[in-house]
Amino acid sequence: MTAANPRSDVEPLLRTLAPEVLGIVVRRFGDFAASEDAVQEALLAAATQWPDEGLPEHPRAWLIHVAARRMTDQLRSDIARREREAFVVRQEWPFRDPAETEGDPAPDDDDTLALFFMCCHPALTPSSAIALTLRAVGGLTTTEIAHAFLVPEATLAQRISRAKQTIKTSCVPFEIPAGAERDARLASVLHVLYLIFNEGYTASSGDALARVELSDEAIRLTRAIRVLLPNDGEVAGLLALMLLTDARRAARSGANGELIPLAQQDRSLWNRDAIAEGVALVSAALSNGSAGAYQLQAAIAALHDEAARAEDTDWPQILALYGVLKRMADNPMVALNHAIATAMVEGPHAGLALLDAIEASGRLEGNHRLDAVRAHLLERAGDRAAAVTCYLAAAGKTASVPEKNYLDAQAARLTEAS
Amino acid sequence: MKYMLMMHAPKEGWTTAGIGTWPQKDIQAHIAFMMDLNRTLKASGEFVDGQGLAGPEEAKSVRARKDGTPDTDGPFAESKEFLAGFWILDVDSTKRAYDIAATISAAPGKGGAPLYMPIEVRQVMSAPPTEQ
């Protein structure tokens, strides 16, 4: 044992070790659901003991030892029960404790990657995949995750347990898929990480003070997967996109959580280190050939972040990038952003014409963003009355409090000015 | 995404045809239905909160007087419906919220016949904002 460590030192260590330990335990025992419970118990034991008693000499081996002991106890009691029920022939229990036989076993990168693939399996609903990833790979407790999403702990526990059940019934193997399936499954992993990152926007917007910063957690997990897949352009692109977006965190909301639009943000509050890292990541990724959607979005975020003033923003370049994105994926939100960029380069009427086409397609029906963007472009075109109507329509449809407040304030500003 | 599901019951006939006037087995079937529904929503990991509200007989409307003290009014005999209970659910889609609302709406009433209560479905404002 080393000197006593405060909780603040122990928790990051436990979160780093969590997927490594779980990978080893799953590899040995095979049963993902039970292994995950056992590792979670080991993490909780460590979180209670280590701050008082100090770190063990081999923290990873300690966790594996405790989780494996829990697994063997569980399996022995399962076997005993089945023997009582006279189902199973007697067998020697073959497991030997790794901590007794091997010292500190090295983590296997492939096991950690396989964990990501398993927790973000497309058979799971997004909310299940998010919860399972945060617990099994992120090493967060059920309490912490429940707190971050403002749901009861029992509900979150149930969500995780159902996710594990789905993995079991879908017979998801604990392995890295090959070929085209690997690419599709990696896309699911990155999507789950992106959703976690996006949820962090809610937590930091004022009234919901979450114990766990979901954006930070998403960045940490994306860094972890980048260590495992250093040459993947989309992993680098997603990490860059997160860093370049998160760099604006301090500037994007006011004292009462009110939204401050990009053009009005105090750019001196932007995190220069995060911008530099994001720009370097996306530049390197883009120079390596075919650009994916995350890389393109990161490149756009970089162009915003690199402009010293809003009016210095390289809109022609942003418009060109949205054009590429639009051809790559038929996504109405991309089309909407493309319309904004078009308006910035060619004027509001060109943007409004594109909005009409999006509206006619019916794919953003009921979505407040279409009204919000239209309001903004109408205002730029000088049609204040129509802009007010659209700002109010958008305010009535959004499900975000800061955004509603922002949109209402825009309508009020225009009404007062006229 | 979180939704609030509000169960409205008809005020008219509340005392003459309300749940207290049903045969005992129908009351039990209704309660069992609601208990079962809550168990299902907890097991699916969607339940955030759910409460039944005390009857409308004691419902009051409160406004502040000029000096800030409460001015209590009601109950209101003339209103057509009253809020009998609510759920807050965290679901993956709007459709799922509507499906659950339809299940609640068809809760068994007198003689086991579906009540077809109006369930108001409102999104709780918990979405991440978009950077404008």
Image (cartoon, helix red, strand yellow):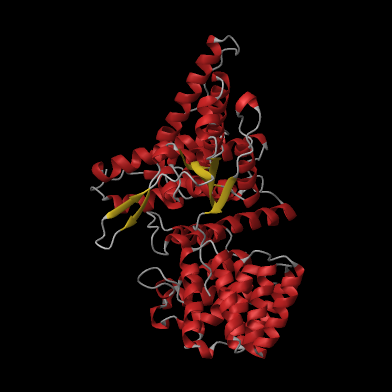
Q: Indicate left or right for B89 with A181 as reference.
A: left
Identify which residue is drawn at 67% across, 53% down. A185
Q: Nearer the viewer, residue A52 or A227?
A: A52
| B63 relative to A38 in the view: left or right | left
Number of numbered discs overlaid on the protein picture: 0
Is residue A46 shown left or right of residue A150?
left
> Along the line of sight, which residue is nearer the eye, A337 or A71?
A337
- Whether residue A119 is visible, yes or no, is no
Q: Position of residue A135 (x, y in %)?
A: 48, 46
Spot occupied by residue A156 in the image (x, y as percentages of width and height): 48, 42
The residue at the point 65 percent across, 40 percent down is A173
Residue B114 found in image quarter = top right
- Residue A119 x, y percent position in the rendering: 58, 46
Relative to A402, B112 lies left or right? right
Residue under the point 24% across and 43% down: A52
Decide which of A362, A283 is in the foreground and name it.
A362
Q: Which residue does the image show at 53% across and 61% down from the upper left?
A: A399
